[in-house]
């Protein structure tokens, strides 16, 4: 039976990769319209608006660049794609939002939701469903982005009470590292969708999965450290400012 892929088409060969841009007009127009509406509706200071534009830049890399096609070939590329959503685009969008009356009270619920969704979409049956249905594919992407944005909104806009925010960041780091460890040390590959497509890139399916786990386990920690430093720096400035 011919394998169907939900978005960005069939896995590219290495020599086809840099020609595999996703120029879906509905996607590009939709993202441009969303960026313009958010820019006009934003009540954030200028730096917040530019964070929003940078967030859309991360989405362009994720969904328009050849990375989108590569995610159908390599699970490691899918991991990079998901990390762009939850550790780059999401905090940038959070920084572009005006703080609300409940901002920063407790990020625990958002941490729980974002963790459950991240692990759920890495459960092999859910992952397979997302790659075989366009609707489920976009449900996966939207749920990861929205839940992570809610998490970072609560965490980054709570400079007066840094300890809960820093603990939430630590908790999110821990669950990301644990998922990375599970993928790295699993004795067999989990994702049948990549069994055939990794060989062209010089990787076995297990090596591809191990690479994905190492990406979650090591490089993914850097955004957490940077954003945790931002929270601590803001709290320090607030503590030193006159009442």
Image: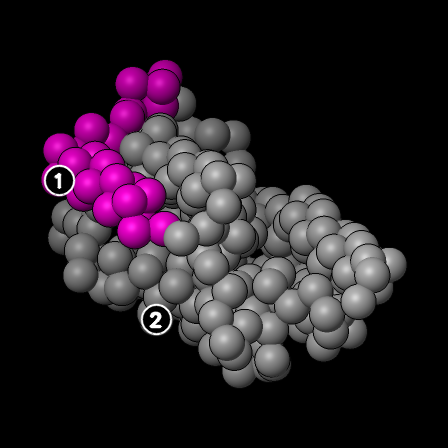
Report the quarter where the C terminus lies.
Answer: bottom right
For label 2, the crowd category at 10 Å Cα-Cα, with few meaning under 14, some 14 to 19 and many 20 or more, is: few
Q: How is the image coloured?
A: one colour
For label 1, the crowd category at 10 Å Cα-Cα, with few meaning under 14, some 14 to 19 and many 20 or more, is: few
Q: Which residue is found at the position 53% from the left and 52% from the top?
A: 95
The residue at the far right in this view is 240
Quick one: SS at disc 1? helix
Q: Is residue 129 visible?
A: yes
Badge number at residue 101: none
Q: Nearer the viewer, residue 89 or 134?
A: 89
Quick one: SS at disc 2? helix
Please state if 239 lies on the left or on the right of 130 as rendered.
right
Q: Is residue 64 above or below residue 131?
A: above
Q: Is residue 61 above or below residue 90?
A: above
Camera-near label (1 vs 2) is: 1
Q: Which residue is found at the position 13% from the left and 40% from the top?
A: 26
Q: Nearer the viewer, residue 30 or 126?
A: 30
Q: Residue tagged by mark 1?
A: 26
Find the distance from the CA under tag 1 to the CA under tag 2. Answer: 28 Å
- Residues marked 1 and 2 touching at CB (< 8 Å): no
Horizontal and vertical percent for residue 34?
Answer: 24, 46
Horizontal and vertical percent for residue 88?
Answer: 53, 46
Horizontal and vertical percent for residue 185?
Answer: 67, 61
Q: Which residue is found at the position 24% from the left and 46% from the top?
A: 37
Q: Is residue 179 visible?
A: no
Badge number at residue 125: 2
Q: Which residues are magenta?
A: 15-42
Q: Which residue is found at the position 73% from the left and 70% from the top?
A: 160
Q: Is residue 98 above or below residue 7?
A: below
Q: Nearer the viewer, residue 57 or 189?
A: 57
Q: Is residue 201 above or below residue 242?
A: above
Q: Nearer the viewer, residue 137 or 181?
A: 137
């Amino acid at each position: 039976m011919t394998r169907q892929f939900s978005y960005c088409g069939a896995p590219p060969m290495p020599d086809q990769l840099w020609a595999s841009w996703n120029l879906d007009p509905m996607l590009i127009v939709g993202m441009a319209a969303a960026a313009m509406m958010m820019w006009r509706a934003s009540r954030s200071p200028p730096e917040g608006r530019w964070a929003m534009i940078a967030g859309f830049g991360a989405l362009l890399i994720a969904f328009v660049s050849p990375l989108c096609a590569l995610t159908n070939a390599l699970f490691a590329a899918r991991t990079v794609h998901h990390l762009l959503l939850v550790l780059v685009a999401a905090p940038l969008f959070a920084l572009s939002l005006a703080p609300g009356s409940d901002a920063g009270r407790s990020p625990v619920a958002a941490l729980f939701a974002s963790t459950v969704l991240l692990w759920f979409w890495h459960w092999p049956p859910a992952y397979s469903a997302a790659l075989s249905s366009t609707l489920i594919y976009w449900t996966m992407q939207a749920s990861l982005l929205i839940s992570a944005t809610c998490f970072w909104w609560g965490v980054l806009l709570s400079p007066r009470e840094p300890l809960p925010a820093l603990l939430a960041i630590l908790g999110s780091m821990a669950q990301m590292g644990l998922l990375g460890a599970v993928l790295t040390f699993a004795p067999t590959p989990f994702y049948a969708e990549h069994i055939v497509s990794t060989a062209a890139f010089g990787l076995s399916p297990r090596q591809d999965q191990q690479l994905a786990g190492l990406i979650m386990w090591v490089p993914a920690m850097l955004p957490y450290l940077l954003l945790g430093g931002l929270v601590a720096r803001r709290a320090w400035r607030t503590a030193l400012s006159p009442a």
